[in-house]
Image (cartoon, rainbow, N blue to C red):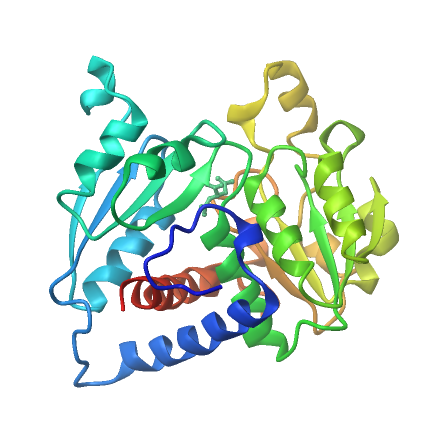
């Protein structure tokens, strides 16, 4: 992938080479943040963040990344209720408008494909910060960067994606990014929340070894990477089903006894039921470190897109 000037709309845009390039750049950005006399490569640039869905980490992470690179930020965190979308402006026109103000746009929306719709009207790069249940490429990037950083290498790992594989856009992004490496993927979910068949087909076409199961216990002890996430309440049409499944998998001290000593546990956060805070100090839990890695990855991405 040639980064400069590109939209970042979906995970499939990245190949192994561009992922590794991005990890190298993210490593440099981590060092840059710690250095005492940073230059300001994006001093003249403006980032616009347009959020049509709640966010704590992703929006702050992008905005922090831009500010650390010397750039500026304009932001609307309540686009659904507090923008001209309310008056009937189309996403494409909104993209056209915002790109007259900003040099890069980051957007989140509850509908799959909505970010691509806005990008059609935009004259500047648009980055998908989550579109419905479909995709969340930059979360997937920071998750893989965390694996790369913690494990040294992604090839050869046994990686479990555990929870709501149907609705979690983060699992969708992780699975597709991981298909660029030689990994074994354990897809662990309740029967109602299995990985969408088109993603399983995508993985199979890339010859990824897949183990599908609804039992965490059977496989936990084999995993090098344990990736979990909350059950996605807002995507369920039947609330009773959510209530029934919300505690399908819970990581606590007892469960972590069954995991490898050198395994790592990842989550994009927020956590609700699936991670008991009693394990926060377990050195295998990397979910807070992921947040710092996310800033470095987004700095790398913004710099590559805008340079
Ligand atoms: C994720 C999201 O928005 O998809 N959050 C995030 O970006 N860190 C995960 C989630 O909401 O469960």
Q: Position of residue 169 (x, y in %)?
A: 56, 40
- The correct choice, above or below, for 213 with respect to 231 in the image is below
Quadrant of image for the C terminus = bottom left
Query: Can you say whether 182 is above or below 87 in the image?
Result: below
Residue 275 seen: no
Give the number of marks.
0
Taking depth in this image into account, of 288 and 84 the one nearest to the observer is: 84
Q: Is residue 13 above or below residue 167?
A: below
Q: Is residue 307 visible?
A: yes
Residue at x-position 26% and y-position 35%: 95
Q: Looking at the rendering, which quadrant does residue 97 occupy?
A: top left
Which residue sits at x=25%, y=45%? Answer: 123
Q: Is residue 114 left or right of residue 40?
A: right
Give the residue at x 37% y 55%.
Answer: 6
In the picture, measured across the screen, residue 148 lies left or right of residue 247, that is left
User: Where is residue 282 shown, x and y percent of the image?
Assistant: 59, 65
Q: Position of residue 176 (x, y in %)?
A: 64, 52
Q: Which residue reaches farthest bottom?
A: 36
Residue at far right of view: 218
Residue 115 placement (x, y as % from top left): 39, 36
In percent of the image, x 58 and y 49: which residue is there?
Answer: 173
Q: Nearer the viewer, residue 241 or 95?
A: 95
């Amino acid at each position: 992938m040639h980064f400069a000037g590109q939209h970042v709309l979906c995970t499939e845009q990245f190949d192994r080479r561009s992922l590794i390039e991005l990890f190298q750049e993210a490593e440099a950005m981590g060092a840059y943040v710690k250095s005492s006399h940073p230059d300001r490569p994006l001093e003249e640039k403006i980032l616009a963040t347009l959020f049509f869905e709640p966010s704590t980490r992703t929006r702050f992470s992008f905005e922090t990344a831009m500010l650390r690179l010397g750039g500026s930020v304009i932001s609307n965190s309540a686009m659904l209720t507090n923008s001209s979308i309310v008056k009937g402006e189309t996403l494409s026109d909104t993209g056209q408008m915002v790109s007259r103000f900003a040099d890069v746009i980051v957007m989140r929306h509850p509908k799959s494909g909505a970010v691509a719709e806005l990008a059609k009207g935009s004259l500047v790069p648009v980055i998908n910060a989550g579109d419905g249940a479909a995709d969340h490429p930059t979360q997937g990037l920071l998750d893989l960067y965390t694996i790369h950083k913690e494990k040294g290498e992604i090839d050869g790992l046994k990686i479990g994606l555990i929870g709501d594989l149907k609705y979690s856009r983060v699992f969708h992004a992780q699975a597709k990014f991981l298909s660029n490496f030689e990994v074994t993927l354990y897809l662990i979910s309740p029967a109602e929340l299995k990985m969408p068949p088109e993603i399983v087909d995508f993985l199979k076409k890339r010859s990824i070894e897949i183990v599908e199961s609804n039992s965490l216990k059977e496989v936990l002890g084999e995993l090098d990477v344990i990736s979990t996430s909350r059950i996605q309440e807002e995507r369920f049409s039947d609330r009773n089903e959510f209530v029934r499944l919300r505690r399908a998998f819970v990581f606590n001290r007892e469960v972590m006894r069954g995991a490898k000593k050198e395994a790592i546990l990842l989550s994009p956060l927020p956590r609700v039921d699936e991670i008991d805070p009693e394990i926060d100090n377990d050195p295998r839990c990397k979910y807070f470190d992921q947040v710092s890695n996310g800033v470095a990855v987004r700095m790398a991405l913004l710099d590559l897109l805008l340079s």
